Amino acid sequence: MTCEPQIYGDFELLNISANNPAELDGLEAKNMRVEMPADVRYVSEMAKRGFYFGDRTIGASINLAKSTFDYNRFIRFDVRNADGKTDRIYEIACECFEQDRRFHVRPELDSKLASLILKQWVKELGCAYLCWHKDRVVGFLDVECCGEDSQFVHLAAVEPKYQAAGAAMSLYAYAFKVAKENGLKKLMGRVSTRNVSALNLYVALGATFEKPVDVYLREG
């Protein structure tokens, strides 16, 4: 089990990764966000401990070394490396993550607290790509290194009205293309099972899925 204390304004959160509910016995933190392997038996056990089931996510993985996709044909928008524009990234993130349990860490949705958490995430973005429509940024995607030959999609979002037009596909395809050109062998992400459009996007780009994880929340 790992525990990471986090502070957002006057809200203190213990972010936990555990293998099973029993590992939480004895913890007395007021506010907790817990991730553990998906198991239907754990839902009732966590409820008895006062936890609310928040979400289920699943890992997506693309084997770039074996991929034969021509990613260029999926890039229909202008995608560039980020050069500032953090205010615009934050605006898009706030619009797109209205119920995302990475940021809504209370059982009841709290937009004010979520905006604080999102602001911190955007501040810490590393290698981000921006999707442009004419002179407007309509989406972004950020990747992190996770080993010598792999990257992880840390955060990505596209304005809703541009999603169906292919902006999200353009961002992901561009990121995968750059990663492959740089000799990386794998690109991974983690997606809410409620986010059907993102799941379909990963399927279209040849992803496989594994290791579902459940998210639980408790507020003291």
Image (cartoon, rainbow, N blue to C red):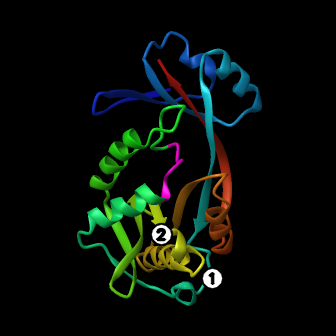
Tag 2–tag 1 contact (CB < 8 Å): no
**Is residue 44 shown above or below 182?**
above
Secondary structure of residue under mark 2:
loop
Looking at the rendered structure, the number of numbered marks drawn on it comes to: 2
Separation (CA) of disc 2 from disc 1: 29 Å
Q: Nearer the viewer, mark 2 or mark 1?
A: 2
Residue type at numbered disc 1: Thr
Which residue is labeled 1 in the image? Answer: 68
Percent x, y of residue 174: 47, 79
Which residue is located at x 52 percent, y 42 percent? 101
Would you say residue 48 sits in the magenta stretch? no
Q: For this view, does 108 lie left or right of residue 129?
A: right
Task: Say the numbered circle drawn on residue 119.
Answer: none
Magenta stretch, residue numbers: 96-101
Q: Nearer the viewer, residue 107 or 124?
A: 107
Secondary structure of residue under mark 1:
loop
Residue 84 sits in which quadrant?
bottom left
Q: For this view, does 5 lie left or right of residue 158?
A: left
Sequence-wise, the earlier of marks 2 and 1 is 1
